């Protein structure tokens, strides 16, 4: 566990989180960045070892993805999530966001409807709009201390000519892990109305007990053939900068259309180091991940305890997965603009404004706690400094 306690200086490494915060948040102040969804931890040693060995070789010519890499993905999802997939179902992409774009471009036409569920990861909106598809939003429903899907509204929307549904599972930012029953309802509706289900499961390895990640495509042959699953080692093992992810679908027609698009765009392989990192992480990173999950849960508990004692008018929706906390600041009475300004100017703290996640995000902030406890504690003290006297 000591492995995750080390404070690593990430400045001047082209880090979006640490080197672009001033630019993104339009501030000249030195603020603590707790926004971008990557971790301030070293990845498993097996990943570093594999990359270092290849770097030492010194020649970086064309590389390809061999069957052993696919085998590690197959064994990982079977071992961790009980999902048995064929190697032929696996295609590759530089990341989950490019994969969403691929699915939208390859399997829908301009003007067709694509459904999302806000509040949700901002690229869900932009990948629909930037590709000239019609965005249909079916917002999640706040229910006590959690979020639910309004299945009546969802069915009405899907029945209205929706071509594709983008599912965030586990959900970013609200932290829900959709249950088997919820997934079966979603999948059954997509089959009924012939809606392609694109399930972004990038946070699927970061699930806290007793919750369990169930791949949507694993529920039935009918749902599987309607589903495209997107996974990556990037969130799990802190490898986002290496740009390697997988697109998995049983549906041969979907695969052929995506492959045709890849050829059209000149995509044929991944970065050499991305391939090696993916392979090493899935083959040897499991023990590291188990320790990470314990550490992240401790960080969640640290935030819960602090807010209860020091800022009782600020609450979190306790996550069932991910290292991202959905923080409810509505009792401060501050507008979204004033809230963000207060955090930046008084707290010297940068978090993702809830409004960036669409409808339902007003009054919220998203905090990244994938960092040493010392950093989490510092972030909480800054949050207190900004909001302690703000209570309507």
Image (cartoon, helix red, strand yellow):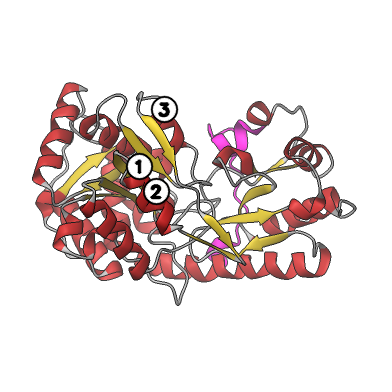
Mark closer to the chain start, 3 or 1: 1
**Proximity of marks 2 and 3: CB atoms separated by less than 8 Å:** no
Pick the residue in front: 75 or 222.
222
Quadrant of residue 65 within the rendered picture: top left
15 in magenta: yes
Residue at screen point 48% across, 63% down? 321
Front position in the image: 270 or 324: 324
**Which mark identifies residue 96?**
1
Could you tell me which residue is drawn at 37 percent across and 49 percent down?
A: 156
Label 3 to label 1: alpha-carbon separation: 17 Å
Question: Are the residues tagged 2 and 1 within 8 Å (C-beta)?
Answer: yes
Pointer 2 or 3: first along the chain: 3
Q: Earlier in the sequence, mark 2 or mark 1?
A: 1
Residue occupying the point 13% across, 46% down: 66
Q: Which residue has dot 3 on it?
A: 129
Mark 1 neighbour density, 10 Å: few (under 14) some (14–19) many (20 or more): many
């Amino acid at each position: 566990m000591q492995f995750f306690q080390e404070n690593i200086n990430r400045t001047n490494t082209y880090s979006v989180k640490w080197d672009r915060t001033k630019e993104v948040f339009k501030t000249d102040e030195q603020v603590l960045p707790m926004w971008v969804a990557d971790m301030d931890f070293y990845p498993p040693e097996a990943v570093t070892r594999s990359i270092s060995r290849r770097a030492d070789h010194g020649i970086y010519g064309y590389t390809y993805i061999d069957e052993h890499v696919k085998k590690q993905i197959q064994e990982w999802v079977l071992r961790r999530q009980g999902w048995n997939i064929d190697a032929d179902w696996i295609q590759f992409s530089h990341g989950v966001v490019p994969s969403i774009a691929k699915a939208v471009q390859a399997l829908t036409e301009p003007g067709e409807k694509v459904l999302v569920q806000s509040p949700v990861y901002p690229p869900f909106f932009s990948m629909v709009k930037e590709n000239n598809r019609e965005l249909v939003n079916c917002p999640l429903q706040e229910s006590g201390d959690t979020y639910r899907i309004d299945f009546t509204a969802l069915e009405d929307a899907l029945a209205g000519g929706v071509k594709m549904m983008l599912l965030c599972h586990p959900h970013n930012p609200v932290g829900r892990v959709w249950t088997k029953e919820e997934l079966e309802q979603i999948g059954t509706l997509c089959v009924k109305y012939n809606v392609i289900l694109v399930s972004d499961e990038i946070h699927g390895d970061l699930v806290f007990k007793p919750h369990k990640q169930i791949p949507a495509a694993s529920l039935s042959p009918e749902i599987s053939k309607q589903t495209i699953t997107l996974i990556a080692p990037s969130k799990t093992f802190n490898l986002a900068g290496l740009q390697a992810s997988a697109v998995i679908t049983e549906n041969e027609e979907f695969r052929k259309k995506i492959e045709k698009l890849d050829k059209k765009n000149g995509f044929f392989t991944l970065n050499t180091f991305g391939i090696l990192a993916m392979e090493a992480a899935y083959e040897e990173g499991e023990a590291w991940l188990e320790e990470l999950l314990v550490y992240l849960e401790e960080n969640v508990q640290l935030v819960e305890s602090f807010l209860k004692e020091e800022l009782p008018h600020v609450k979190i929706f306790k996550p069932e997965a991910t290292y991202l906390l959905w923080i409810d600041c509505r009792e401060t009475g501050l507008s979204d603009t004033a809230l963000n300004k207060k955090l930046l100017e008084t707290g010297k703290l940068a978090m993702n404004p809830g409004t960036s996640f669409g409808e339902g995000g007003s009054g919220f902030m998203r905090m990244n706690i994938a960092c040493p406890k010392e950093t989490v504690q510092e972030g909480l003290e800054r949050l207190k400094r900004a909001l302690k006297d703000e209570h309507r």
